[in-house]
Image (cartoon, grey):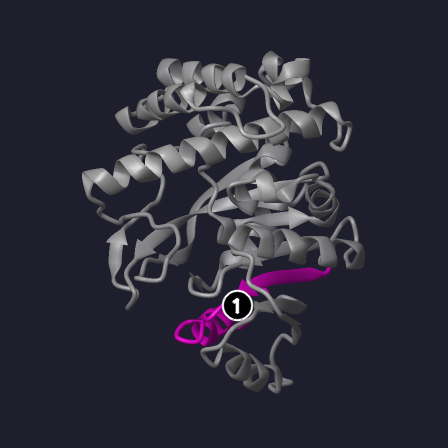
């Protein structure tokens, strides 16, 4: 088994050296760190080039990408490039540019993966910290809004993603499955897409230990403990509902188009996803998702998503979709 790390960066100069140092300091060493830098202009590339010169540490394989399409597409594109180069039995760890791995992370994840049927995907809990790594939250899965295994239910996973991208480890054959997923731009985040694919196969599991520090800072696109005004919460709620709706329709098309391995009988994939209208009708899909949110949402925040989805169902359809 070769141990790969896949790290995507964009203007990460303040933190990326500390992140790579934490990866290189693992008690179980990785074999290679693949870094895809997306149009950084803040000195990130100079930092990476300097780190790559250290031949005594895990080698950095550097890829300079001219555009910055955002974290989801950056990782999708990088996964597609890496997938043909890794073996089915290899292990690929995803990494962000600004978090910190605790020293036993790789060893703990490999222990958890030992004996699992392939393909597989694992993720782990984290300690939430501030920019200076001071503790904010001892665990991510407090139950509000996220908990596992609760949120790995197939219906709930259509509405909420409990998986933090930098905690994921995938087998090489799981990476290949995700890399073949059509319409990557339709997905809210790459880690959500991984979760959907792996859960459908019943090959997604959580390692309960906190194995990294999840850094929160002003440049985070997504945050675990950010306070927002009511107006911003409403605006973001509508935006997320739209993204969830688009993602669910793309997910239905992917399953109907035969691009994915067969679903596990234990996955309990909602039957409506296989209906011919599931990939086209905004109203029907939005109302099914809203029903899931209102009936099974474990928190007020999750049930509120149902109301946002109802509002999305009332909006005029986008070109190429049906009512």
Location of residue 218 in the rendering, given as x and y in whole percent from the top left corner: 30, 62
Location of residue 128 in the rendering, given as x and y in whole percent from the top left corner: 32, 53
Per the image, the residue denoted by label 1 is: 23
Toward which corner of the image does residue 314 lie, by quadrant? top left
Residue name at image x 65 percent, y 67 percent: 34
Q: Is residue 264 above or below residue 108?
A: above
Q: Is residue 139 above or below residue 64?
A: above
Relative placement, left or right, of 160 versus 4 is left
Q: Kindly tell me whether residue 1 is visible in this rendering.
A: no
Region rendered in magenta? 1-29
Residue name at image x 26 percent, y 58 percent: 135
In what element is the residue under mark 1? helix
Question: Crowding at label 1, few (<14), some or many (≥20) Cα neighbours within 10 Å?
Answer: many
Relative placement, left or right, of 140 versus 11 is left
Q: Quadrant of the N terminus?
A: bottom right
Depth order, front residue of 237/170: 237
Toward which corner of the image does residue 255 lie, by quadrant? top right
Residue name at image x 34 percent, y 53 percent: 127
Depth order, front residue of 12/262: 12
Location of residue 157 in the rendering, given as x and y in whole percent from the top left corner: 50, 29
Q: Is residue 167 above or below residue 40?
A: above
Q: Is residue 270 above or below residue 261?
A: above
Residue 13 inside the magenta-drawn segment: yes
How many numbered markers are drawn? Answer: 1
Depth order, front residue of 269/305: 305
Depth order, front residue of 196/317: 317
Q: Quadrant of the C terminus?
A: top right
Toward which corner of the image does residue 321 lie, by quadrant? top right
Location of residue 50 in the rendering, given as x and y in whole percent from the top left corner: 56, 86
């Amino acid at each position: 088994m070769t141990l790969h790390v896949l790290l995507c960066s964009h203007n990460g100069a303040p933190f990326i050296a500390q992140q790579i140092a934490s990866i290189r300091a693992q008690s179980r060493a990785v074999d290679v760190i693949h870094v895809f830098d997306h149009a950084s202009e803040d000195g990130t590339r100079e930092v990476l080039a300097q780190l790559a010169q250290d031949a005594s540490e895990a080698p950095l394989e550097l890829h300079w990408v001219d555009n910055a399409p955002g974290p989801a597409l950056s990782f999708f594109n990088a996964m597609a490039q890496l997938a043909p180069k890794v073996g089915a039995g290899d292990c690929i760890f995803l990494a962000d540019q600004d978090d910190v791995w605790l020293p036993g992370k790789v060893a703990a994840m490999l222990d958890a993966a030992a004996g699992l049927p392939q393909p597989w995907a694992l993720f782990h809990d984290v300690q939430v910290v501030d920019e200076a790594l001071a503790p904010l939250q001892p665990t991510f899965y407090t139950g509000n809004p996220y908990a596992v295994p609760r949120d790995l239910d197939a219906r709930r996973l259509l509405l909420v993603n409990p998986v933090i991208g930098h905690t994921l480890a995938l087998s090489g054959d799981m990476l290949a499955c995700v890399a073949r997923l059509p319409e990557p731009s339709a997905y809210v985040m790459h880690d959500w897409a991984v979760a959907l694919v792996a859960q459908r196969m019943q090959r997604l599991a959580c390692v309960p230990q906190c194995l990294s520090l999840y850094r929160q800072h002003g440049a985070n696109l997504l945050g675990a403990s950010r306070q927002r005004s009511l107006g911003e919460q409403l605006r973001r709620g509508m935006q997320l509902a739209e993204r969830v709706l688009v993602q669910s329709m793309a997910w239905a098309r992917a399953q109907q188009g035969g691009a994915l391995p067969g679903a596990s009988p234990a996955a309990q994939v909602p039957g409506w996803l296989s209906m011919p209208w599931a990939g086209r009708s905004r109203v029907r899909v939005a109302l099914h998702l809203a029903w899931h949110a209102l009936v099974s949402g474990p928190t007020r925040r999750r049930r509120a998503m149902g109301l946002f989805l109802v509002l999305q169902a009332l909006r005029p359809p986008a070109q190429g979709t049906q009512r």
